[in-house]
Amino acid sequence: MQRILSGLIRRPTADLSRFPLGFDLRAINVLEGIRAALSVTVLVALNEFLDLPGLMEAALAAWLACLCDQGGPIRRRLPAVIGFTLGAAAIASLAGLARNGGVWAAVPVASAGLFCLSMLSIYGQAATVVGNLLGVMLVLALDRPLPMAEAGIVALACLAGGGWATLLTMVIWRLHPYRPARQAVGRAYRALAAMAQDLRHLVRRDRVSEVDWDAHARAHRRSVSEEIETTRGVVMDTLRVRGPVTRRAAETLIRTEIADQVFGALVAASEVLAQPGDVPEAAVLERVLRRTRVLLVELARAVEHDGVRRSRRVNRALDGLTEEVARLSPGTPLGRIGDVLLELLHSAVTLSGTAHFLPASRQSIALPTLRSRIAGPLRANLNWDSVTLRHALRVALVAIPAVAVSVPWAGSYQHWLTITWVLTMQPHFAMTIMRAVERIVGTIIGGVIAAGILVVAHTPLAMAAVIFPLAVVAMAVRQVSFGLFITAVTPLVVVLTELGETGASGWEIAGTRALLTVIAGLLALAGGLVLWPSWEPGRLFEQIRAAIAAHATFAEREISAIVGDATPEAVEAARRAAGVASNNVEASLSRALHEPGHANRFRLEAALVIDAALRRMGGRLIALQLDEGLQPMLTPADWRRWRDWLATSLRALAGNPPDLLLTPHPVLAGSDAARTETLGRLARQVELIAGALKRIAAGRSLPSP
């Protein structure tokens, strides 16, 4: 059973060509599901007993308002929920009034409205969710014309439903304010544990090729780096509201910074182990990694449950880690890495970290003005290079035939075609493919489940009763997987439709929804192909140039710090920027590999080579930080020559077009050259990147790195 469950949990993969369709079962949140279900079922039950006009619209608004709540501090959640509530009231009433003008009024209202709502994505993920759900409200509001009095009732119902959901989630049943930050830190520690476990497996193997090390780096460095950056954002959002001076705030900051430093130590260990030749103390390091993984898993559990539990398992792992680290030769790279891991994990367990763990420069953050936060992204995206602008225009054009077909259609299901067609399309065509697959498969499976439920629950009272568990399940799994969420929400939609439309069978409703979803999914793919397709390879090499430039800055600051020309804070900022740039490359590369056609095969092969070379370079630069005996090996003048060559060469390769004529790297004679093999490996990665770019210019295929 454990193997089956572990296979269902989303894991990082080295194969960027695979769809990220896994499940993260740890993201299940039953309490959130119960809370959202209450917000809906209370209103549905009142409608069954009181039969008041507008209660079903209020229930819909409450449900969608709960979907807008993405978690985190109330200060960040409240604008999204209130914004949706106000927007839903205005859209539902005004669109219903516009529907009185027939299809000639509905089409331009839908097209213009969906364009504006799609543009909200320039303001971040929360605004994207609000825009999508307001788009659903807009399409639903065009189902039937509303007289002025009824439009007012619908507006009030939306305000009441959204207000009830806001009151329930923000006041009556508030989840712990620090829980999102604790859960984010816990996920970061679990990602580190998975990285340590995979590294341990590699150490235990007799032979490990460069391909294996590249697969390890690609699978874990990106996922761990993204988890840590996400955690940092969640933590800082929490601290802006709760204040950075409390004990909880200090603990959360310390744990986040420790996670980042453990990540650096694990990267450095992988770089040392990946060097050619046998590593004498690899067996000891394998035991160090085993103890490290145990501690990281226990720390994740402790953080998620709000307290460090000094259990026997933790004590044994910490004592064992201390004994194993003592067996590593002091002063060697592995010995230094072991000392760093022991110090960090001991601090994480006891929370006795000193002030140098606290990022003082991040405790006071100057927020931009409201005007700049609104106008800045808008100005930046009002040009044809903006993927968001092109996608919004695509949605607006697709809405014209969708609404023109669905509005004259007399029935209760026509809006499914428009909603699915519009929401399935994504800014990137590769993501449209994935979203179409998830929607179609999830809707078909959910429809079968719904039909089975309606065989048993066929009275209005029974259907109203079954809404509660369906809403709990749907909301509880919404962060697990989009496909699983669609599977869970489809029975809820079908039962609600059956409750409002007597006379239709469950199989008829489920079959109609599945058929319209398949049609809309195929139309969405066609729309993404025909209307300004956002092919990824063109943007991929922009990301590659940015990543090469970021690594140039990282190399420059890292070597500058060795000779005292840069501060640790500057090095840390450059390291994070280089990691984020590499993550962007891999995200873009993954989308490019999902797109149909092989016209850009040579370019994609080059991107894979460059991505691997940048990951190796980043890891070896991190390893320099932990090698205290490296500085005296060269004179400051020699270090500066290497620094200047690395930075200048990488920036030349990051140019547009790149300058492929590299100058020879500095040569160190005699024993110095043997002792500075790390610099030689860095030079080889630069030359590998240059070679990949040269083959791109020649249009030739590339060998695997």
Image (spheres, helix red, strand yellow):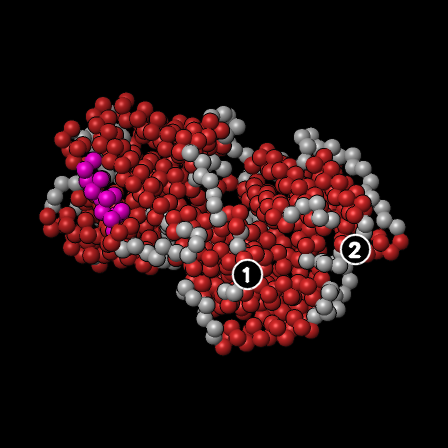
Say few, some or many: other residues with alpha carbon within 10 Å of mark 2 (under 14 / 14 to 19 / 20 or more): few
SS under mark 2: helix
Q: Which residues are magenta?
A: 155-168
Magenta stretch holds residue 164 = yes
What x and y, as percent, mark residue 101? Answer: 23, 23
In this view of the protein, which residue sits in the foreground, 366 or 666?
A: 366
390, above or below 272, in the image: above
What x and y, as percent, mark residue 206? Answer: 71, 67
Residue 450 can be seen in this image? no
SS under mark 1: loop
Separation of marks 1 and 2 at Cα, in angstroms: 29 Å
Magenta stretch holds residue 628 = no
Residue 696 disc label = none
What x and y, as percent, mark residue 677? Answer: 79, 54
Q: Quadrant of the rendered structure where residue 102 is? A: top left
Residue 632 disc label = 2
Task: Give the residue at x 18% y 32%.
Answer: 151
Task: Give the residue at x 72% y 40%.
Answer: 647
Contact flag, marks 1 and 2 (Cβ < 8 Å): no
**As shown in the figure, which amino acid type bears the numbered disc 1?**
Thr
Q: Pointer 1: what residue?
A: 354
